[in-house]
Image: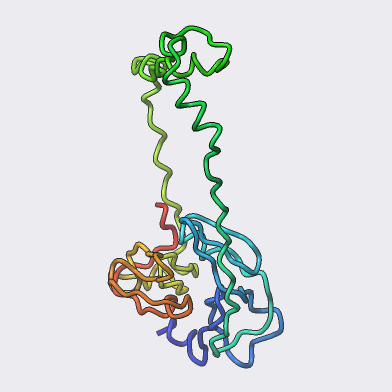
Amino acid sequence: MEKKEELVGKVRCQRIGCNATFSEDDNPEGSCQYHDSGPIFHDGMKEWSCCKKKSHDFSLFLEIPGCKTGKHTTEKPVLTKAAPSPKKPVSAPSSSSTTDASSKETCSRCRQGFFCSDHGSMAGQMNSKPLNLEACAPSKSNTNTHSSPVPAKKLVDINEPQTCKNQGCGMTFKEKDNSETACSYHPGPAVFHDRMRGWKCCDIHVKEFDEFMGIPPCTKGWHNADPSS
């Protein structure tokens, strides 16, 4: 009952990166911290185009603090789409290197492993033996087999407000109100492929990032403020 009274009259901010609840009579300038430009997904990297902050992990990417401040709003903002990163041109192999390689293969001195003044030190590279990685690796007997101790789970007051870190949730909760159906979330993982964004857990994929953030959670469970535990 107490939890419901706290949320009466409050709505959730629709700015990307905020996810806070607010009321119209308590919405001062600077209370909202958000991202005003869309994200860039390239080669497994997630980056906010507005502040250039990035992360490989999607959960950590969503936790990057917003770089703009303003008032909370219930209107979905129009994100500025960032241009994709230009691909670096791949230089074609030079004809001279191809010619040198073919001439070394036919050179009798190079093939026997002798130094050749025509082809320099490349002769040794052609006949060099591959490095034995097993011989260089440390023996198992010298390897420290002691695993690091598992960190103890943080103890919290059952009445202390916490923020759920489950993907797709972000709700504020108290441990005394937590239950096996209190949280609606995506167990994941998030999938980004060929300009599509979606969740593997519920097999829903969309093109726009704000549509992706609006995909309803597909799983019920416990709120979790410390996903690493």
Front residue (pair 127, 62) = 127
Instruction: Tell me what residue is drawn at x 50 percent, y 63 percent.
Output: 41
Q: Quadrant of residue 34?
A: bottom right
| Residue farthest along the right direction in this orientation | 29
Q: Is residue 61 above or below residue 75?
A: above
Q: Is residue 84 left or right of residue 222?
A: right
Asked if residue 103 shows in the view, the reply is: yes
Q: Quadrant of residue 24?
A: bottom right
For the N terminus, give its image quadrant.
bottom left
Counting every numbered tag in the picture gives 0
Q: Is residue 189 left or right of residue 72?
A: left
Front residue (pair 193, 117) = 117
Front residue (pair 181, 110) = 110
Front residue (pair 103, 158) = 103
Instruction: Tell me what residue is drawn at x 49 percent, y 14 percent.
Output: 124
Q: Quadrant of residue 31?
A: bottom right
Q: Is residue 134 above or below residue 175?
A: above
> Residue 155: image x %, image y %?
45, 55
> Residue 220: image x %, image y %?
29, 72
Q: Is residue 6 left or right of residue 68?
A: left
Asked if residue 219 shows in the view, the reply is: no
Instruction: Tell me what residue is drawn at x 52 percent, y 77 percent.
Output: 19
> Residue 125: image x %, image y %?
48, 18
> Residue 32: image x %, image y %?
64, 78
- The structure's colour scheme is rainbow
Q: Is residue 152 above or below residue 15?
A: above
